[in-house]
Image: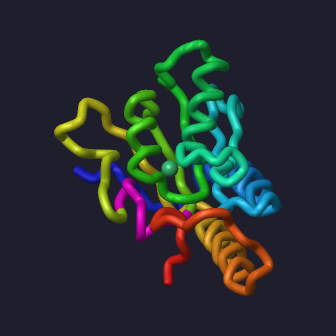
Amino acid sequence: MKSHEKTGGKTGKERDDHYFIREALKEARKAASRDEVPVGAVITHNGAVIARAHNRREEAADPTSHAELTAIRKAAKRLNSWRLTGTTLFVTLEPCLMCMGAILQARIPRIVFATFDPKAGACGSLYDLSCDRRLNHRVHVTSGVAEGEAKELLKGFFKRLRTGKKNLKGPTSALLTPDE
Ligand SMILES: [Zn+2]
């Protein structure tokens, strides 16, 4: 059974989802301002943000410095536990294989993301690790929250990149490339 759901109503949970995705978008804008592919994430626990992070792959020269992974590390430190039970991860772009792996390892019960990544997404696009019966953990997924804003941010970033105003070091991987 698919665990995905699409937003559309106006429940309190959905208002909260929009609020926290906007917090993740703030992180994504920080990344863009530092010439990083704009992806941001926040993790909440009991309705409060306990970790925020943005993509720092260029600055850290680290292929694992994705927003989600950094946020997971910070949240685990904050809760003093590798097991992030009772948390929700909000991220502006569909997680990749690596990040979905970490989400499963951390036993995060729910994720909310803004826009799909058709070239690298592991939560419905290329793969769907959120509800693979062979794995011992399921993740409840909500997608499409503030999708337009997240898409525009990514499109604008790659447009500037193409016009030569920005110059990422090293090859841009299949991951986090514009959907065109
Ligand atoms: Zn990732």
Does the magenta segment cover residue 117? yes
Looking at the image, is 43 positioned above or below residue 56?
A: above
Q: Is residue 19 visible?
A: no
Say which of 99 and 144 sits in front: 99
Say which of 109 and 70 sits in front: 70
Magenta stretch in the rendered image = 115-124
Q: In the image, what residue occupies the spot 63% across and 51% down?
A: 57
Main secondary structure type of the part rendered in magenta: loop
Choose top left, top right, bottom left or bottom right for residue 31: bottom right
Q: Is residue 153 visible?
A: yes
Q: Determine whether, in the image, residue 49 is placed left or right of residue 62.
A: right
Q: What percent of the width, then of the height, locates residue 29?
A: 77, 59
Residue lying farthest front? 170
Scheme of image coloration: rainbow
Does the magenta segment cover residue 76? no
Looking at the image, is 176 positioned above or below residue 105?
A: below
Q: In the image, what residue occupies the spot 32% across and 37% down?
A: 138
Residue lying farthest left? 134
Q: What percent of the width, then of the height, locates residue 114?
A: 57, 60
Say which of 60 and 46 sits in front: 60
Q: Determine whether, in the image, residue 112 is placed left or right of residue 1.
A: right
Q: In the image, what residue occupies the spot 59% across and 51% down?
A: 91
Q: In the image, what residue occupies the spot 63% across and 34% down?
A: 44
